[in-house]
């Protein structure tokens, strides 16, 4: 199954991208699903569950969390109970990882080598990641290759997502799952087991690391 695991819509409040347009584009590109990872909130994307989609296409919901070591994608959370702080930015990454795990979710650093909103080389010293976003559709090939190298060094699964904020960006990167995934819990479980790999939708860089 081909799932774009890193998507944004107007519910991230940094764009005007309608989720219906996102979904139509993903279907046109023959993806099997998308995951809305709106900034700061799992609950922000709740309205997308009312959107009708064809049988066999799936819409999942995660969240992109802003920490003191860059952005962190979390999958498998049911609501915003993870946020015990009174703010949305620069949350302690180790505390966030611990809480997400306590709630049954998994943690994946987003665009690890992009710059100010990324962990960079600190990625090697932070424990608790369940996978690495080795391909982000908005990052350069060099940035993605660095992330893939860290995944190999740490023996972590690779995932990919477009990080789309507009129609043209949908599907630029996605994750291929070996087994069917029908819920966000399935997504989290299959990533933890390493039954996935990241790839680029438009050709070029491809991170094919697949955990045994």
Image (cartoon, grey):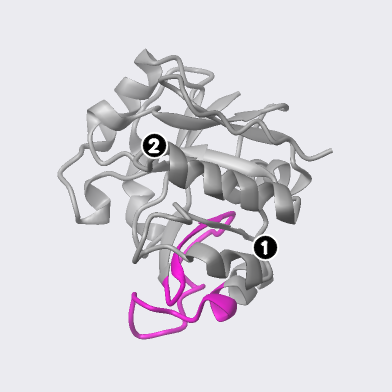
Please state, as top left, top right, bottom left or bottom right, where the C terminus lies in the image: top right
- The image shows residue 107, relative to residue 204, as above or below, that is below
Residue 13 showing in the rendered view? yes
Disc 2 from disc 1: Cα separation: 27 Å
The disc, 2 or 1, on the residue closer to the chain's N-terminal end is: 1
Residue 156 showing in the rendered view? no
Picture residue at 50% right of the left edge, 31% below the top: 174
Look at the image and say whether residue 69 sits in the magenta stretch.
yes
Q: Position of residue 33 (x, y in %)?
A: 48, 28
172 left or right of 177 in image: left
Viewer-nearest residue: 20 or 164: 164
Secondary structure mostly taken by the magenta-highlighted segment of the chain: loop
Please state, as top left, top right, bottom left or bottom right, where the N terminus lies in the image: top right
Name the disc covering residue 137, or none: 2
Viewer-nearest residue: 124 or 38: 124
How many numbered marks, from 0 up?
2
Q: Which residues are magenta?
A: 67-96
Q: Position of residue 7 (x, y in %)?
A: 37, 42
Q: Secondary structure at mark 1?
A: loop
Closer to the camera: disc 2 or disc 1? 2
**Mark 1 = which residue?**
104
186 left or right of 202 in image: right
- The image shows residue 205, relative to residue 191, as above or below, that is above
Occupied quadrant, residue 203: top left
Viewer-nearest residue: 192 or 118: 118
Name the disc covering residue 134, or none: none
Occupied quadrant, residue 71: bottom left
Q: Position of residue 40 (x, y in %)?
A: 36, 65
Picture residue at 31% right of the left edge, 22% below the top: 25
Q: Residue furthest front?
A: 142
Look at the image and say whether residue 93 sits in the magenta stretch.
yes
């Amino acid at each position: 199954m081909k799932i774009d695991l890193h998507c944004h819509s107007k519910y991230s409040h940094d764009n005007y991208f309608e989720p219906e347009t996102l979904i139509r584009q993903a279907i046109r590109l023959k993806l099997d699903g998308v995951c809305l990872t709106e900034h700061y909130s799992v609950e922000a994307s709740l309205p997308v569950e009312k959107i009708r989609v064809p049988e066999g296409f799936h819409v999942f919901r995660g969240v992109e969390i802003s920490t003191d070591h860059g952005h962190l994608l979390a999958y498998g959370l049911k609501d915003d109970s993870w946020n015990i702080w009174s703010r949305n930015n620069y949350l302690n990454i180790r505390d966030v990882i611990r809480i997400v795990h306590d709630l049954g979710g998994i943690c994946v650093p987003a665009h690890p080598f992009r710059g100010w909103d990324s962990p960079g080389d600190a990625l090697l010293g932070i424990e608790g990641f369940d996978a690495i976003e080795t391909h982000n559709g908005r990052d350069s090939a060099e940035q993605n290759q660095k992330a893939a190298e860290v995944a190999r060094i740490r023996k972590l699964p690779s995932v990919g997502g477009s990080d789309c904020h507009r129609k043209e960006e949908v599907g630029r990167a996605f994750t291929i799952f070996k087994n069917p995934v029908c819920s966000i819990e399935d997504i989290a479980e299959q990533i933890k087991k390493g039954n996935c790999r990241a790839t680029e939708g438009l050709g070029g860089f491809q991170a094919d690391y697949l955990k045994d």
